[in-house]
């Protein structure tokens, strides 16, 4: 596939601007004293383009309001590359938790919970081919939406999935077979988004796979092609090969700011967006872990899920539990100021970072729910004082780009 003119000039543009712009940040921040609650039981209608459709919340961008209010009310973002585009809700329901390790998932309870999240305006679901029954649950869920919700509501539902193949030869038939499997499981003719992961960069087969995925997109079997856990160098190479990816899903939190050191600049140059996960670190960024001491056995809340264990290791790499407590105290101060929770502040801070289109919040379907806390992300704006205090607390930890490497390198280290 021949590269486009934009792709051909990408390397020159990125190299020229990288060193002198990577630390350049906008000094202009939106400020507002305007506040409102955004619950489905009492949706405000002060000029924003959030409306009910058949009694449910439609996730749309606000229009014809002030700049600060628009940012505050904006619940959706459009991912684009060329003629490809997909509008998603800026807070995504992450379904890794269906894969085991968080408690037994009951199918009917899980689907009912998905409907509740969607009814509350959280209409974008993120899953993967290897997340246990996630794609099958989505298939049952989307059929219930088709039967039980109005057509306008159905149009706003998004199902994003991932394909994580072994590093075998990427033939057209092999790629097609695997994508067709996800289409059948999710019961859709066309996948809203296929996010592609590759384990071994020394094997260039990822370019073959992405070209075959692009062919399937042209056939109408995939709406948008995207990446997950690719680093900046490989993202640039993929774009130079003319592959129209719209986003890259990466780990990004107030502890892990690596995407802002290299990746975000390339995204701003090319229009590729970031979807983030690990943004509340499996729940570590919450009041539950404030004023706790995990260095003493059994002294604090148990780290009893795969996500808590994973992100505790990230805390250790960043600066340790004592340093993390100082960060939590800062986050709590900001949260109390706005009348929200630490997780809401954690997500809002990352959504406000350059290049970020959306952030993941994991859902334990049928086991627990945090819809009110999640929707609170859209109810406030972090002012300059908030942003500076969080940035200062975050920067006291180690530079994870130097410790771990670029985005996704944690999955490829020997």
Image (cartoon, rainbow, N blue to C red):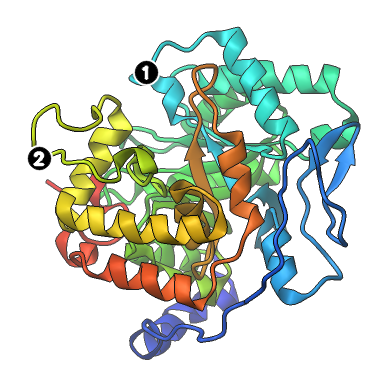
Earlier along the polypeptide chain: callout 2 or callout 1? Answer: 1
- Vertical position of residue 137 compared to residue 338: above or below: above
Q: Which residue occupies 65% across, 55% down?
A: 379
Q: Which residue occupies 28% across, 61% down?
A: 406
Residue 132 position, x and y percent, is 44, 19
Badge 1: residue crowd in 10 Å (few <14, some 14–19, many ≥20): some
Q: Which label sits in the foreground, 2 or 1?
A: 2
Residue 171 position, x and y percent, is 45, 36
**Residue at disc 1, secondary structure:** loop
Q: Badge 1 is on which residue?
A: 100
**Residue 412 seen in this snapshot:** no
Q: Is residue 5 left or right of residue 409?
A: right
Q: Which residue occupies 63% across, 26% down?
A: 183
Q: Nearer the viewer, residue 151 or 73?
A: 73
Q: Quadrant of residue 20?
A: bottom left
Q: Badge 2 is on which residue?
A: 295
Rounded to the nearest angstrom, the CA distance separating label 2 from label 1 is: 27 Å
Badge 2: residue crowd in 10 Å (few <14, some 14–19, many ≥20): few
Residue 345 position, x and y percent, is 48, 55
Q: Nearer the viewer, residue 16 or 62?
A: 62
**Residue 88 seen in this snapshot:** yes
Q: Which residue occupies 67% across, 48% down?
A: 88
């Amino acid at each position: 596939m021949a590269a486009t003119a934009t792709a051909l000039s990408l390397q020159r543009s990125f190299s020229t601007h990288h060193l002198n712009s990577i630390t350049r940040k906008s000094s202009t921040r939106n400020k507002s004293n305007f506040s409102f609650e955004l619950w489905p039981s009492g949706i405000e209608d002060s000029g924003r383009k959030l409306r009910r459709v058949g009694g449910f919340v439609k996730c749309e961008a606000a229009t014809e309001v002030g700049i600060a209010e628009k940012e505050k009310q904006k619940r959706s973002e459009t991912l684009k590359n060329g003629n490809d585009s997909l509008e998603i809700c800026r807070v995504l329901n992450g379904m890794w938790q269906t894969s085991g390790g968080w408690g037994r998932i009951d199918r009917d309870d899980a689907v009912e919970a998905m409907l509740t999240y969607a009814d509350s305006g959280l209409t974008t679901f993120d899953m993967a081919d290897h997340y246990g029954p996630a794609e099958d649950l989505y298939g049952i869920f989307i059929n219930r939406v088709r039967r039980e919700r109005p057509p306008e509501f159905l149009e706003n539902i998004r199902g994003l999935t991932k394909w994580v193949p072994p590093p075998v030869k990427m033939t057209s038939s092999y790629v097609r077979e695997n994508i067709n499997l996800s289409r059948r499981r999710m019961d859709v003719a066309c996948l809203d988004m296929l996010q592609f992961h590759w384990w071994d960069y020394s094997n260039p087969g990822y370019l073959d796979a992405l070209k075959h995925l692009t062919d399937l997109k042209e056939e109408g079997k995939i709406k948008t092609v995207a990446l997950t856990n690719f680093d900046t160098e490989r993202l640039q190479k993929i774009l130079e090969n003319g592959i129209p990816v719209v986003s890259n899903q990466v780990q990004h939190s107030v502890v892990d700011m690596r995407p802002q050191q290299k990746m975000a600049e390339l995204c701003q140059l090319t229009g590729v967006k970031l979807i983030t996960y690990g943004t509340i670190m499996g729940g570590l960024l919450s009041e539950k872990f404030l004023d706790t001491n995990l260095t003493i056995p059994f002294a604090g809340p148990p780290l009893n899920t795969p996500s808590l264990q994973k992100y505790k290791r990230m805390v250790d790499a960043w600066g340790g539990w004592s340093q993390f407590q100082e960060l939590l105290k800062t986050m709590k101060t900001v949260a109390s100021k706005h009348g929200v929770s630490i997780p809401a502040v954690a997500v809002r801070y990352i959504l406000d970072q350059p290049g970020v289109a959306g952030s993941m919040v994991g859902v334990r379907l049928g086991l627990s729910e945090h819809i009110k806390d999640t929707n609170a992300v859209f109810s406030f704006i972090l002012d300059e004082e908030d942003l500076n205090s969080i940035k200062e607390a975050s920067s006291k930890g180690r530079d994870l780009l130097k410790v771990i490497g670029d985005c996704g390198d944690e999955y490829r280290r020997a």
